[in-house]
Amino acid sequence: MSDIFSRKGDGAADRVVVRMTDLRKTYFMGHGSGGGLFGKRGGGEVLTVHALRGVSLEFREGEYVAIMGQSGSGKSTMLNLLGCLDRPTSGEYILGGYDVAQLDDDELSEVRSRSIGFIFQSYNLIQQYTVTENIQLPLTYQGNGIISEEAQERTMELARLVGLHDRLDHRPNQLSGGQQQRVAIARSLINDPYIILADEATGNLDSATSYEIMSMLGKLNDAGKTIIMVTHEPDIAEYAKRIIRMKDGVIVEDGPSPRMLVELDEENHAEVVA
Amino acid sequence: MGRILRSVKLGMKSLMLHKLRSGLTVLGIVFGVAAVIAMLAIAEGSRREAQARFQMLGATNVIYRSVKPSDEAQLSTGGRPARILNYGLKYEDFDRILATVPNIKKILPIREIRKQIRHDEHALDGRIVGTTKDYAEFNHLEIERGRFLSQHDDDDYKTYAVLGSDTAKKLFPYEDPLGQAVKLGSDYYTVIGVTKERASTAGIGGSLAAQDYNKDVYIPLSSCRVRFGERIMNFRSGSMEAEETQLSQITIQLTSTDVVSQTVPIIKGAVEPFHPKVDIDMTVPYDLIMEAERTARQYAIILGTIASISLLVGGIGIMNIMLATVTERTREIGIRRALGAKRGDITQQFLIETVVLSGVGGLLGVAIGVIIPYAIAQFVAETKAQVTWNSIILAFGISVAVGIIFGLYPANRAANMDPIEALRHE
Ligand SMILES: Nc1ncnc2c1ncn2[C@@H]1O[C@H](COP(=O)(O)OP(=O)(O)OP(=O)(O)O)[C@@H](O)[C@H]1O
Ligand SMILES: [Mg+2]
């Protein structure tokens, strides 16, 4: 098996990769504060949306987390913050030792290109690029942007891992949704990130393909990858080891997934039998 | 460098996604660049042609020619209807110039007479030119056979003749002309040389008419003077008219082009007070060259500017398309930003795409622009074209600059998008 799957049990399993402390995100949407015909309503009205209202969390290396919750509960906002696509309004977010709130735009880009792997609901591949080029995209934004021999090999290895090594020169429009999502998974792994973030990664796929993708993520987690995913579907969330439920921008529940409880029971049971 | 190259390659890919659109966008630049090069080539062609023409007259020369005064001028000086018309340059003028004007390297007197030239039954209406040994050099004549006139020929009043190539062919179709005799007026002259064929010069206006050297006969000026005299009889509408001219032309060669402008007034001072009637005319090729240079430059600026406007229009076209492209590719921009692209990377990507567009347009434009002027020169009479490296570099440079300038705004617009918003874009 490839080295991607072979980093288990190296003793680093408790290392904290993500620490969020009282994280808040507020959107301000100005209404008519400018001039105009309807702009004279007492200096304009600012609509404030508290998307996150004080979230404190820790993720350790090797965790597999599903974030659930109703629409509008702040899941995507949370994932965007985790992915350094956005900065919190207040609170602290430490990712692998960096205080993200202190970083400027370019530094955030740097963190994204080196430490984070994204998997999106709508795959988000670049249409004019081949499978290879899509997988290598994050690397082009690191250092001098040249793809090394080593990276080339890694690309091949990842393509093999997701079962697309024979479609390297194909373009996204020549692939099925599931295949595109597999390219996206390979892409999220090319930079060997601290965390892999998936926002509704199976939202556009049928259930068979969804399970296929989830089992792939499961294997990655088994190999030690930290995965944080957002999902609506309970059966998808079951693949994770830890489930966080959100409501109105706060965490209302945080615990092991039922799968883990069953496994724990079985272990206990086995011990008892023995 | 490698990164830029890779970006260019990937930029091409994005452009190839919309071949027709990219192609049409490029057209504006293609035509702009081609127009700039073609216009400048035609301007340069006419400049060089004028240059060559004046250069043939000699950049260090000052040319005086005798001109027949106009009828009014003759009448105003109280001439009689039937008279001897005495006009033009005199031997005295020649001597005075030689004695008083500085910076002279060589000076050439010329007497031209239209006469029939005969050998046996062969005859030709040609031009007898009485001159000295320097004539060949002044007029870029080369000798085919024998030799040109020498100082001795002039000193000793020799009855020698050098024939122009046509003259030689007409008079001696089957024989070797050297050593044979030709009859000029009432006297016989021995042929001592034949000149090579020489392309005739175009007239440059003023007193310098077009010249065909091939129908000439050259004889020593001294012999010409004693044998033909200064008076020429013409029969015109029944009455006889006589003209008296001593020299048809004096060409003064100065030591260098630097002294031309300062010496010209001195020459005028030495000659013109003795010619109150306007019966002589001065041509200064150097002034004409400078004048031609100035006109050519203005011509080039005007043509270049007009052509550059089309480049500008091409640039606006590119900007328009790039703005549309940026909007259309908002999501792609979001993806790239999410995967680690910095604002600068996005700016660079779109700038490279525009520069590739305008650069490709520029190259095509150069290719077309190099062909067009020669095609025009081929089909339009009196037009010469000369494509210069400068115009190619200029036009291509402008096209790339247009790409950068008009690409900057769309590229910045792309770079300043919020990644999350961009990702959400449909
Ligand atoms: N850019 C924005 N400007 C203003 N409000 C926003 C913005 N982004 C999100 N919100 C608001 O923040 C809240 C949380 O949104 P978020 O996208 O995180 O929800 P979600 O849990 O991902 O929902 P869904 O399951 O539908 O994707 C919502 O009320 C949303 O309207
Ligand atoms: Mg969401």
Image (cartoon, rainbow, N blue to C red):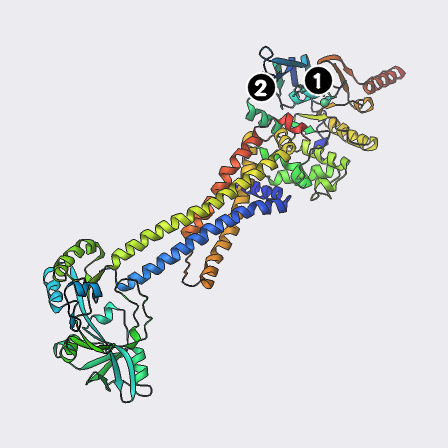
- Where is ligand 2, by quadrant? top right
Report the amino acid beneath label 1.
Gly
Q: For ligand 1, tell me if the residue under mark 1 lies within 8 Å.
A: yes
| Residue to which mark 2 is pinned | A36
Q: Quadrant of residue A179?
A: top right
Q: In terms of secondary structure, where does tag 2 sit?
A: loop
Task: Find residue B395 and report its horizontal and vertical position in percent.
Answer: 45, 48
Residue drawn at x 21%, y 58% is: B256
Report the amino acid beneath label 2.
Gly
Q: Is residue B246 among what the camera can see? A: no
Which of label 1 and label 2 is nearer to you?
2
| Residue to which mark 1 is pinned | A74
Task: Find residue B131 and report its horizontal and vertical position in percent.
Answer: 19, 73
Subunit ID for the residue under disc 2: A
**Residue B68 drawn above or below residue A59:** below
Q: Residues within 10 Å of mark 2 (few under 14, many from 20)?
A: few
| Quarter of the N terminus of chain A within the rendering | top right
Q: Quadrant of residue B15?
A: top right
Task: Find residue B257 and report its horizontal and vertical position in percent.
Answer: 22, 56
Q: In terms of secondary structure, where does tag 1 sit?
A: loop
* Mark nearer the N terminus (1 vs 2): 2
